[in-house]
Amino acid sequence: MKILLLSSPTVQPDFDRIARLPNLGLVSLAAHVDDLCTVHVADIHGMKNHRDYVRRVVNSYDLVGLTAMSFQYQEALALAGIAKSAGAETVFGGYHPTLACEEIGESADAKLIDYIVRGEGEATFRELVKAKLEGRSQKEILGLSHHDGGRMVHNPPRPLLKTEEIKMPLRDARLIKKGFTSFEIPIDSVETSRGCTQGCKFCSINLMYGRNFRRFAIERVIADIQGAEVHGAGSIFFPDDNITLDVKRLERLCEAIIEAGLTHLRYKTQASASGIASSKKLVDKMGEAGFDGVFLGVESVNRRNLQFLGKGRMSDDAEKAVQYLHDNNIIVSTGLIGGNPDDDREDMWENFRLARRLKVDFPIFYISTPYPKTQMRAELEEMGLVTNNDFTKYDGLHANLRTKHLSDEEVAYITWEMNARYYDYQWLRYNKVKRLYPKWFAKEMLRLAPFYAKRKLALALRMRTREDFFREDLESGELCKGVT
């Protein structure tokens, strides 16, 4: 048997330009079946003609795996159609197929999908491959959805794995080995834990894995970092769901990185503002270990919105967290969510003023998104605020809801305008990116300067309006920087 696992080609262009990461989940899946079959991973995001690539390579494979979030699902179906036409079976995994498995099973999409591996996939995928090789029934495979008697049936869920049961990623399975960088430095991902115990209403993690937190042994994490470096990585991203749930453990990991002589690598992660703010000692140790980028989930300055999002008092810790990180020369990105039920124009601009006051390097002014099956979606539907069920637009850039005071288009336009206004001369003076990555920064400025100069001229001559540029950027999916 030959298996091909495909990353989703659908990405957010703006984020992809800062960090294009090879898929970690797929090489983890590959590690659990490479003793049974030939398995390859193709990270096709970033390709201009990914469908042509899939058509060229898919003919020699028996099973093609695809992973998708909600906004990526439709393109995954198109690739599944290519695989089916070539005679391969298809297996889907990831957030959207897991959470929407019953709806998928009852829809026409099921004709393109032979199997769905739900939730944490390593053990379920291995059992599926073994059953196919041995000609056994799939009825007893936990966590699997499959066809039986002309309909798709959903086997009971699988308990979560113990971390010691999860094999190291098989990076040698990758067919595409170049083009994955952050600020022009080759990058790879290494996980140190899985899960989160918090109950954010907008998040799908709890629906996938429950509210739990599992830690990998620090020795394994260090070995995985070393493995990523052997495969060319000069930068490491830790994609943990909530790496600061155990602050002391993260501090020990930093110490282990220092002791292993791995501080020449550049580390990046996502973290909670409260976790970072809880310990200056931790952040100092992160700086010593080589961390130079942290995404903080601040979400909102508005307490009412924080309560609605299930985030407690996150913004209270933001100022301290950003200060600790900046003191250690660490680039700070923040997620700031607007378009919540009671938001008016002034409420949304509060997040802009917070980012400016904190001198955030890369604020992401994100639109509240009613992801399928989340608690937030149920509440928004009950309020009658969800305006769009086209999941291809569920990317955080399009508004798929209105507020009690603003239409969905007004929410989207205000968010676009905040991004347009933030990256101005004041930002040029204080951001840390230009100091840490001067080559990348210079290239970006040279790329963007003439583009936005033309826009400013078009505005001055009244040839175009800001609304024109708003619609243009929304169509491209790229956040606007520096127009107004």
Image: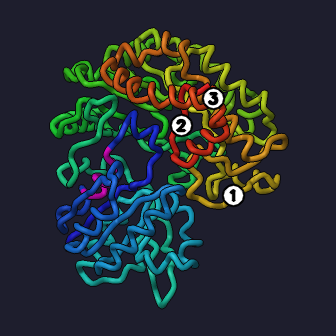
Q: Residue 388 carries which label?
A: 1
| Residue 73 against residue 456 in the figure, above or below | below
Is 288 contained in the magenta span?
no
Q: Which mark is residue 300?
A: none
Q: Which residues are the magenta region? A: 22-30
Q: Residue at x 51, y 79 (%)?
A: 153
Instruction: Work out whether residue 328 or residue 476 is closer to the camera in this orientation and state it.
Output: 476
Q: Mark 1–mark 3 contact, CB under 8 Å? A: no
Q: Residue 281: which quarter of the image?
A: top left
Mark 2 is on which residue type? Leu
Magenta part, dominant SS = helix
- In-image side of 223 versus 207 (left or right): left
Looking at the rendered structure, the secondary structure element under dot 2 is loop
Q: Where is residue 463 in the image (x, y as percent from the top left)?
A: 63, 36
Looking at the rendered structure, the secondary structure element under dot 3 is loop
Q: Where is residue 375 in the image (x, y as percent from the top left)?
A: 69, 51
| Res. 228 visible in picture | yes
Whichever of callouts 1 and 3 sits on the residue coming sooner in the sequence is: 1
